[in-house]
């Protein structure tokens, strides 16, 4: 099979095809209200910049995250007007750009092979559940993926200045992106002995330090607020927490969602394909390892979306590994892996996982919509927890027509409910923010999770109703997720 050559004039065509595909598969979700960290951080910060020009958010708690994504959304809204649909389309267009970079990187990393694994790598990535979910969410990791891999692609092509410029934009989107320019600069300095070229990669560090200085002047804290600093710099360093985080990263990259099929194929192909040991792949492996370690050490929340900037490297490795198989086995393996990835978009694992890892988060958003519609205009005091509490406060989030006062709770644990006993609200919306259908954490691992992860079990709707002399007036259920409306008796 002849090697595919993508000419620059073909990039727009490839990008257009990818963008149309992403828009088509997400068409049903373009008006989906915002979810979790979109509500808690990124949309409020973007709206602050859009409405007032403030680079440091004031309607939500500021933190270390640079304003690159927020600036992009604010400009997009200035051109096309603010709406949830505009936000979703903007992110999908960025996702299409990232997918194009994945395609070009797959071609770069497969140079010399008779087959063309670029299309297989692109297909695996575009149907992977994490990308399908994250490509429509206004969060940092998907644009960070686009810029990380663009910096890697340009570096492998020895276009160091362009790579360094991509890394400048990267660190102004997400601070942990500094791993990429640090690796590239270090490689040029210590391996290739190209000192002058390595100096270009100091520019991203200067840009990031500039943002931190602005943040320090505006908030008094280098990382925006002391709580964020403690949770993301000190909390993860416990050896037990760090070890479990690394195991979870390994599981997600190489085992979960059918990845074990690609991993077995890769282990079979590794010794048979010297390409995996050349300079380009050694750099790619180093980026994968250093990024994974960084987001495990620096980050209290062990979210799989933090791996999105390097996950395409794994899919490219899977796609190239297929070349070591006979044609019939190659097609069978690719078909089974594809089927597993497609299924993982809709089928949730039986163990705890972040709902945003696949389309499960849509189910929670739909439940929140139903609950909001049911109580939006009902009189009386209302109590619930994040993100439902914030959803009532700002119509821009897509749940209510007018803002409503809400008594915000930290959660539904016994310690959160006890203060309400003296003055219960008229209504309370109760739901489980933690996916655990088999109650693995609550029944089997509660003591260890409480010791190492500050876990405290939440009360059921019946327990809360009993404690506050309330009754369950309504209950919404969908795909093993439920939401209850409690009313005073």
Image (tube, helix red, strand yellow):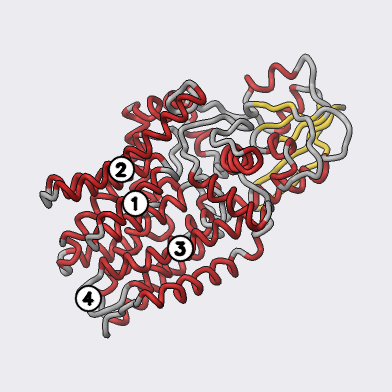
Q: Which mark is residue 90?
A: none
| Foreground disc of the pair 1, 3 | 1
Instruction: Give how far across and how far down residue 84 sits, in percent.
Output: 67, 53
Relative horizontal placement of residue 481, taking residue 108 as reference (left or right): right
Give the CA separation, mark 1 to mark 3.
Answer: 17 Å
Q: In which image quadrant can residue 431 be found? A: top right
Give the CA separation, mark 3 to mark 2.
Answer: 24 Å
The residue singled out by tag 2 in the image is 203
Q: In which image quadrant can residue 317 be found? A: bottom left
Quarter containing the N terminus:
bottom left
The residue singled out by tag 4 in the image is 113
Instruction: Give how far across and how far down residue 150 sits, in percent.
Output: 35, 58
The residue singled out by tag 1 in the image is 165
Relative horizontal placement of residue 170, taking residue 487 as reference (left or right): left
The local secondary structure at tag 1 comes to helix
The local secondary structure at tag 4 comes to loop
Instruction: Give how far across and how far down residue 137 sits, in percent.
Output: 56, 51
Question: Residue at coordinates 59% horizontally, 48% vertically from top-left?
Answer: 74
Question: Residue at coordinates 34% horizontally, 54% vertically from top-left?
Answer: 254
Question: Residue at coordinates 29% horizontally, 60% vertically from top-left?
Answer: 154
For marks 2 and 1, the one nearer the N-term is: 1
In contact (CB < 8 Å): disc 1 and disc 4:
no
Give the CA separation, mark 1 to mark 4.
Answer: 30 Å
In the rendered image of this protein, does residue 251 appear above or below residue 414? below
Instruction: Give how far across and how far down residue 126 sits, in percent.
Output: 46, 65
């Amino acid at each position: 099979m002849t090697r595919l050559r993508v000419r620059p004039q073909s990039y727009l065509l490839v990008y257009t095809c990818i963008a149309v595909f992403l828009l088509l598969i997400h068409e049903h979700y373009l008006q989906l209200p915002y979810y979790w960290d979109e509500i808690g951080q990124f949309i409020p910060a973007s709206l602050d910049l859009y409405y007032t020009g403030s680079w440091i958010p004031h309607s939500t708690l500021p933190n270390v995250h640079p304003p690159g994504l927020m600036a992009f959304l604010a400009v997009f809204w200035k051109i096309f007007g603010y709406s949830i649909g505009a936000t979703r389309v903007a992110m999908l267009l960025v996702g299409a750009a990232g997918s194009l970079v994945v395609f070009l990187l797959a071609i770069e990393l497969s140079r010399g092979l008779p087959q063309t694994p670029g299309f297989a790598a692109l297909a695996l990535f575009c149907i992977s559940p994490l990308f399908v979910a994250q490509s429509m969410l206004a969060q940092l990791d998907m644009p960070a993926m686009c810029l990380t891999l663009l910096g890697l692609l340009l570096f492998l092509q020895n276009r160091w200045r362009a790579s360094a410029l991509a890394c400048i934009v990267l660190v102004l989107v997400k601070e942990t992106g500094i791993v990429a320019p640090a690796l590239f600069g270090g490689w040029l300095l210590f391996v290739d002995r190209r000192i002058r070229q390595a100096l270009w990669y100091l520019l991203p560090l200067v840009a990031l330090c500039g943002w931190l200085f602005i943040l320090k002047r505006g908030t008094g804290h280098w990382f925006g607020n002391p709580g964020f600093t403690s949770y993301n710099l000190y909390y993860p360093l416990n050896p037990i927490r760090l070890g479990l985080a690394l195991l979870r990263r390994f599981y997600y990259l190489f085992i979960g969602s059918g990845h074990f099929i690609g991993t077995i194929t890769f282990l079979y192909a590794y010794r048979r394909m010297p390409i995996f040991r050349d300079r380009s792949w050694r750099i790619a492996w180093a980026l994968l390892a250093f990024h994974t370690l960084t987001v495990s050490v620096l980050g209290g929340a062990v979210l799989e979306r933090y791996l999105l900037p390097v996950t395409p490297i794994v899919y490219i490795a899977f796609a190239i590994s297929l070349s070591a198989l006979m044609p019939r086995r190659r097609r069978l393996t690719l078909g089974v892996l594809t089927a597993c990835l497609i299924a993982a978009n809709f089928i949730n694992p039986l163990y705890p996982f972040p709902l945003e890892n696949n389309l499960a988060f849509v189910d929670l958003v739909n439940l929140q919509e139903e609950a909001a519609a049911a109580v939006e205009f009902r009189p009386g005091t209302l109590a619930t927890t994040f993100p439902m509490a914030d959803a009532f406060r700002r119509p821009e989030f897509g749940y209510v027509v007018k803002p409503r006062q809400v008594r915000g709770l930290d959660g539904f644990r016994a310690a959160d409910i006890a203060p309400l006993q003296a003055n219960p609200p008229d209504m309370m919306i109760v739901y489980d923010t933690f996916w655990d259908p088999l109650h693995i954490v609550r029944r089997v691992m509660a003591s260890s999770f409480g010791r190492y992860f500050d876990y405290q079990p939440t009360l059921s709707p019946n327990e809360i109703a009993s404690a506050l002399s309330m009754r369950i007036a309504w209950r919404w259920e969908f795909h093993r997720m439920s939401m209850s409306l409690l009313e005073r008796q």
